[in-house]
Image (cartoon, helix red, strand yellow):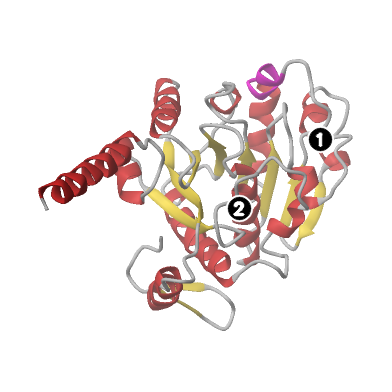
Amino acid sequence: MMGGLVGIVLALVIIVCLELLNNKVRSVEDIEERTGCLVIGEVASFNGSKNKDRSSDMDRSNLLLTSGSVSFYITESYKALRTNFTFTVSASEQKNVVMTSANPNEGKSTTASNLAISLAQMGHKVLLIDADLRKPVLHRIFQIDNSGGLSTMLCGMHELKEVLHEAVVENLDVLPAGVIPPNPAELLGSKKMREFLDQVNDTYAYVILDAPPINTVSDAITINGEIAGLLLVACFDRTKYDDINRAVKAVEFANLNILGFVLNDIAVKHSSGYYKSYYKNYYYKEYSHDEEGKMEENGARGG
């Protein structure tokens, strides 16, 4: 009997120790407590479970809200993110927002693309820019030409109208990265970049820049121009808190505003029914849509 109790105690101690050693993001509350920043969106996994291979050559167009294969849970989570996003940036005169992450392969480009689409679906004029001049992916996501784009425009090789892909989705224009330059950080921090952002800020309701991961290169925090702030994407059960803290400190050192976090790739637990109940009860109770598709808030923040 005593041996059995000792075994149970040891097992519990091991479980507790493993949990303490697990430094990966597992909850909204922990992110907010450890960083002091709000989580303004939670996005379900596109596979219904953990997506282990983000670097594969999958058909990335299937990860867009415009794809018929996107689940109800993802669509609803982006509607909630859209609402929280518009409230978050409403206090700023600038509507230019940088989307980034701590590390590569954490879903920032997919998140940026779908947030842009969701905003466009509400009738807002949106510009999505691939500001990752080292490893661009938006041209693959939207299946557009990348021979010219932000890099060639900033270098004076093209005019904006020559490389801008208009109405890729209704109300959404996309500017790809273009040819990979030898000096990405210098281009993003240039006077011409600032002038360009000032120009498009007058044309579009929202401008979203998909920038490289902060802990890999400093490009995201060198972007020269008036921006409302940065949105940081974290991947559930993948991103580590040590990496998040490094990214937050880098942004704060650059004296930039962190708008909040988006936690993505959250597995939908069909077997337990938790997420099914969560999305149906939470989102539909908190928000309703009028006949024009405009979201009306009923007094609570969506997750």
Q: Which mark is residue 186?
A: none
> On the rendered structure, is 32 left or right of 271?
left
Do tag 1 and tag 2 residues touch (Cβ < 8 Å)? Answer: no
Residue 195: x and y, percent?
67, 29
Q: Which residue is at a point 33% across and 67% down the rendered structure image?
A: 300
The amino acid pointed to by label 2 is Ala
The quarter in which the C terminus is drawn is bottom left
Residue 58: x and y, percent?
76, 50
Task: Please tell me how many numbered marks the rendered image carries.
Answer: 2
Residue at the far left in the pictured view? 2
Which one is in front in this view, the residue at disc 1 or the one at disc 2? 1
Q: Quadrant of residue 172?
A: bottom right
Magenta highlight on residue 189: yes
Badge 1: residue crowd in 10 Å (few <14, some 14–19, many ≥20): many
Magenta stretch, main secondary structure class: helix
Vertical arrangement, residue 224 with respect to residue 269, above or below = above
Extent of the magenta region: 184-190
Q: Nearer the viewer, residue 54 or 287?
A: 54
Q: Quadrant of residue 220?
A: top right
Q: Nearer the viewer, residue 92 or 139?
A: 139
Q: Quadrant of residue 183?
A: top right
> On the rendered structure, is 243 left or right of 222?
left
Q: Nearer the viewer, residue 196 or 152?
A: 152
Residue 301: x and y, percent?
36, 63
Q: Mark 1 or mark 2, which has the lower sequence index?
A: 1
Vertical arrangement, residue 270 with respect to residue 167, above or below = below
Residue 94: x and y, percent?
52, 42
Q: Would you name the residue on which mark 1 appears? A: 149
Q: Would you name the residue on which mark 2 appears? A: 205
The amino acid pointed to by label 1 is Gly
Q: Secondary structure at mark 2?
A: loop
